[in-house]
Amino acid sequence: MILRSLLSNTSSVLIAIVFALVVWVVATNEQNPTREGLFADAIPITFENRGEDLQILDPSRLIARVRIRTQEDVWQNLNGANFVVKADLGGLDAGEHQVELIAVSADPRVRITAIDPPTVQLQLEKIRQVAMTIRVRVLDEPPLGYEMKTPEVSPSRVTVIGPQNEIERVNDATVDIALRGAKTAIDREASVALHDAQGNPVQNLTVTPATVKVRIPIEQRVGYKDAAVKAVIRGNVASGYWVSDISVDPATVTLVGAPDALNQLGGFVETEPLDATGAKESITKRVRLKLPEGVSVLNANDVMLRVAVEPVLSGLTVRRPVTISETCTLPSTVSPDTVDVILSGPLPILQTLKADDVQIVVDAPRCVPGSFQSELRAVNVPAKITVESIVPATAEVNVEPTP
């Protein structure tokens, strides 16, 4: 009787525990349900046990995705780094292979149910290494009168490593250099490019070193000489003016002639004289070059010569009477009635100022009887003349009452 009662109580307890567990599982699943599906992130494939003399053709395209099962809260915190997809290449030789994929989760709460795709097709190729001599491709010509010598490359050879079928496509290793009008030796660092027989680029190969140093000597041809152009100016500009600049375009020219005649020229050639006598403004004129017999210019035999003529800047102090403006009709006087005006500007204009140039005016601030201090101002100032100061800068205006 006691045993039967004990068994009955034990069964009741077990049933209660099971029931509670079921309730807990149901409640938990409602709050944090189990989710199964294809994980969004693509996972790059890790290749193991690949032969040292083998290389996978275009491995970047080989990716996989995994189908997983886990709780919703775990899923939300997953990313591609939580998974590894592997392919074992042990024992495989060069050629095309279909390899099974294995996926592993770093989180034990995540179960991987499938891999998409379950296998991957790949091409294994023998790795080959060759040494190639670098060829310099010059993209343009040196200037007229100059010649390019044989380019120098350091190092002169590079090592090319990669799949055999790609190596076999390579026809040459080149560096491209543009002279861009250089008249002296060029020293540059350039990247090495690989091309096939049709000139198309060959990629997926490793070039060591990837860049090389290139020197291209450029020298002037015999019978050619660069010379500076020296402008010859005759006469003096007008009084009160000065020559602020002399320029020629082009500043240098390339001469052609016998070496002895060119050597006697020195480093410059003169222009025909330009007469600037009495000039009051800039002169721009095309003038010919003075060349000895047997010497000519590679291009045009004249240059554009510009002589910049500007007035001499100077200063002048003049004394001027102070005039009360007509804004006030009441009788008024001003003190002081004359002031000194300091001017600056072109000397020719300063030397020809007339008495009515630069007048000084004072305003009566309030047209009511009394005394007021007011600032002086200059009017009728010629163009290009600047009033630096008026001494004194203010005057006293006395407005008298109406008689």
Image (spheres, rainbow, N blue to C red):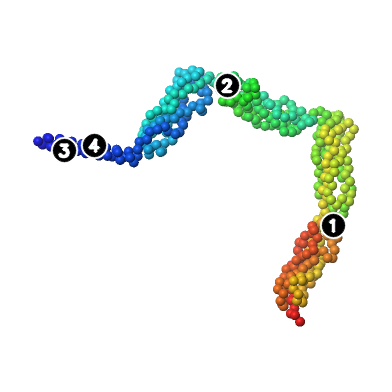
Toward the left, the furthest residue is 1
**SS state under label 1:** helix
Task: Say whether marks 4 and 2 touch (CB < 8 Å).
Answer: no
User: Tag count in the figure?
Assistant: 4
Q: Tell me the amino acid under the disc marked 2.
A: Glu
Q: Is residue 94 above or below residue 310?
A: above
Q: Tell me the amino acid under the disc marked 1.
A: Pro
- Dividing the picture into quadrants, the one containing residue 265 is top right
Q: Residue at x 74, y 29 (%)?
A: 141
- Location of the C terminus by quadrant is bottom right
**SS state under label 3:** helix
Q: Is residue 359 above or below residue 118?
A: below
Q: Position of residue 148 (x, y in %)?
A: 74, 28
Dot 3 corresponds to which residue? 9
**SS state under label 4:** helix
Distance between mark 1 and mark 2 Cα atoms: 81 Å
Q: Tell me the amino acid under the disc marked 3.
A: Asn
Sequence-first disc among 1 and 3: 3
Q: Position of residue 239 (x, y in %)?
A: 87, 54
Sequence-first disc among 3 and 2: 3
Q: Mark 2: give few (<14), some (14-19) or many (20+) Cα within 10 Å.
A: some
Sequence-first disc among 1 and 2: 2
Toward the bottom, the furthest residue is 403
Q: Is residue 300 left or right of residue 92?
A: right
Dot 1 corresponds to which residue? 348
Q: Is residue 348 above or below residue 53?
A: below
Distance between mark 1 and mark 4 Cα atoms: 117 Å
Sequence-first disc among 4 and 2: 4
Q: Position of residue 300 (x, y in %)?
A: 83, 35
Dot 2 corresponds to which residue? 166
Dot 4 corresponds to which residue? 18
**SS state under label 2:** helix
